[in-house]
Amino acid sequence: MTETAGIVMRIHRVRAEVVVAACDAELIGRDLPIGTSGRTVRISAHFYGERPVTREEFLWAVERATIANLLGARALGLAVEAGLVDPDAVGTLGGVPHAEIVTVSS
């Protein structure tokens, strides 16, 4: 059996969109601060999923997504390494690496 990557993932289908939400597993249930207002965002299993995935499953899904929401050092590290995310396009959410990929069809 292939070892999991420490990433959990969920695939959402919304009309014609395939949304892949993936994050480092230990982020589930955490509240991350948004700016300096004192507000936070909860990293939920409802959105990001609970099922651990392998590196191959993660990359396969992200490559086929029309929208991907990626959170965490491992998730972004794999996406950058695979050339799916430009390292200069990685921001942070509550100090945690975060990026979104949106595919625009012509």
Image (spheres, rainbow, N blue to C red):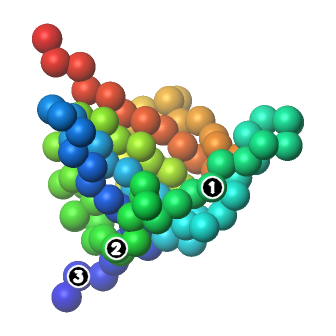
Q: Residue furthest top?
A: 106
Determine which quarter of the picture holds residue 104. Answer: top left
Residue drawn at x 60%, y 67% is: 29
Precedes in sequence: disc 3 or disc 1: 3
Left or right: where 40 falls relative to 98: right
Question: Nearer the viewer's eye, disc 3 or disc 1?
Answer: 1
* Among numbered discs 3 and 2, the one appearing first in the sequence: 3
Residue 87 at x, y = what percent?
48, 36
In this orientation, does residue 47 appear?
A: yes
The earlier-in-sequence mark between 2 and 1 is 1
**Local secondary structure at mark 3:** loop
Which image quarter is the C terminus in? top left
Is the C-beta separation of discs 2 and 1 under 8 Å?
no
Q: Amino acid at mark 2?
A: Arg
Secondary element type, mark 1 = strand
Q: Which residue is mark 3?
A: 2
Amino acid, disc 1: Arg
Q: CA distance from mark 3 to mark 2?
A: 14 Å
Neighbour tally class for label 3: few under 14, some 14-19, many 20 plus, Cα within 10 Å: few
Relative horizontal placement of residue 90, taking residue 46 as reference (left or right): right
Is residue 9 placed above or below 5 in the rendered structure? Answer: above
Name the quadrant containing residue 38.
top right
- Determine if residue 74 is in view: no
- Name the spot of residue 89 as percent of width and height, x first: 50, 30
Q: Which residue is mark 1?
A: 42
Q: Mark 2, mark 1: which one is toward the viewer?
A: 1
Distance CA(mark 2)–CA(mark 1)? 18 Å
Q: Characterize the local packing of mark 1: few (<14), some (14-19) or many (20 or more) Cα atoms within 10 angstroms.
A: few
Q: Residue 32 or 91: which is nearer the viewer?
A: 32
> Residue at 52% of width from left, 30% of height from top?
88
Position of 75 relative to 55 (above/below): above
Residue under label 2: 51
